[in-house]
Image (cartoon, helix red, strand yellow):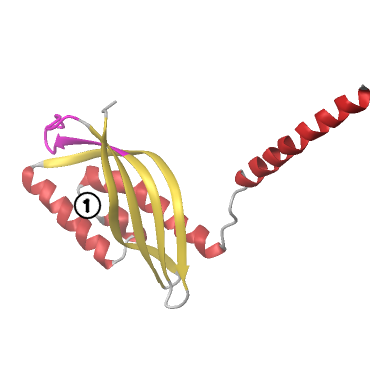
């Protein structure tokens, strides 16, 4: 009797061990190269500086993180807000890393992410809310270039956009 109970348990243990092994493997994090870490740091620096640029209406805060094309896009966007007499209060609520791809020289990189941003348009002089807050989930692809050893966000492609309930 004891032998049959052991065999039954042993038969149940094998699938359990397989599930545990698969779970452990799926939980493993990918190791990033030094360049991939630097690309991610550039995107995070860009995202941390963006609220300040929107609040001040100045692209200067973005200098260390932006290439020429993105700096031009931001300058145009900020000028449009200023022309309307608005400023933008914004914050990044979440950032989920997708794929990072670094190309050999000339060094270029792509980083994909899913991000949630909160926005509120304010009157530049009054600080009064012009439009109600919005929350948007974006699927983004950052295009980066390496200039003088530094990674810069040169272009951002919006892959998806989804309005979320405002908090």
Q: Which residues are magenta?
A: 117-132
Of 99 and 58, nearer the camera is 99
Q: Quadrant of the N terminus?
A: top right
User: What residue sits right under mark 1 in the picture?
Assistant: 58
Is residue 93 highlighted in magenta?
A: no
Residue at the image point whose x is 76% and y is 38% from the top:
14
Residue at the image position 47 percent from the left and 75 percent from the top: 104
Tell whether 144 sits left or right of 55: right
Which type of secondary structure does the marked residue at label 1 adopt?
loop
Determine which quarter of the picture holds residue 56: top left
Q: Quadrant of the C terminus?
A: top left
Q: Is residue 124 magenta?
A: yes
Q: Is residue 155 left or right of residue 48?
A: left
Side (left or right) of 130 relative to 120: left
The residue most toward the bottom is 105
Residue at the location (49% across, 60% down)?
A: 38
Q: Position of residue 122 (x, y in %)?
A: 16, 35
Near-viewer residue (18 or 42) = 18
User: Residue 163's quadrant in the figure?
Assistant: top left
């Amino acid at each position: 009797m004891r032998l049959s109970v052991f065999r039954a348990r042993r038969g149940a243990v094998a699938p359990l061990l397989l599930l545990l092994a698969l779970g452990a493997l799926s939980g493993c994090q990918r190791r990033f190269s030094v360049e991939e870490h630097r690309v991610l740091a550039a995107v995070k620096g860009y995202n941390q500086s963006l609220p300040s640029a929107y609040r001040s209406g100045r692209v200067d805060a973005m200098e260390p993180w932006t290439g020429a094309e993105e700096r031009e896009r931001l300058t145009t966007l900020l000028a449009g807000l200023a022309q309307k007499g608005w400023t933008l209060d914004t914050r990044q609520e979440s950032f989920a890393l997708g794929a990072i791809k670094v190309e050999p020289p000339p060094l270029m990189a792509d980083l994909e992410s899913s991000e949630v941003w909160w926005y509120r348009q304010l009157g530049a002089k009054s600080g009064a809310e012009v439009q109600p807050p919005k929350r948007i989930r974006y699927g983004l692809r950052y295009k980066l270039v390496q200039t003088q050893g530094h990674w810069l966000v040169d272009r951002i492609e919006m892959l998806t956009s989804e309005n979320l309930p405002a908090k």
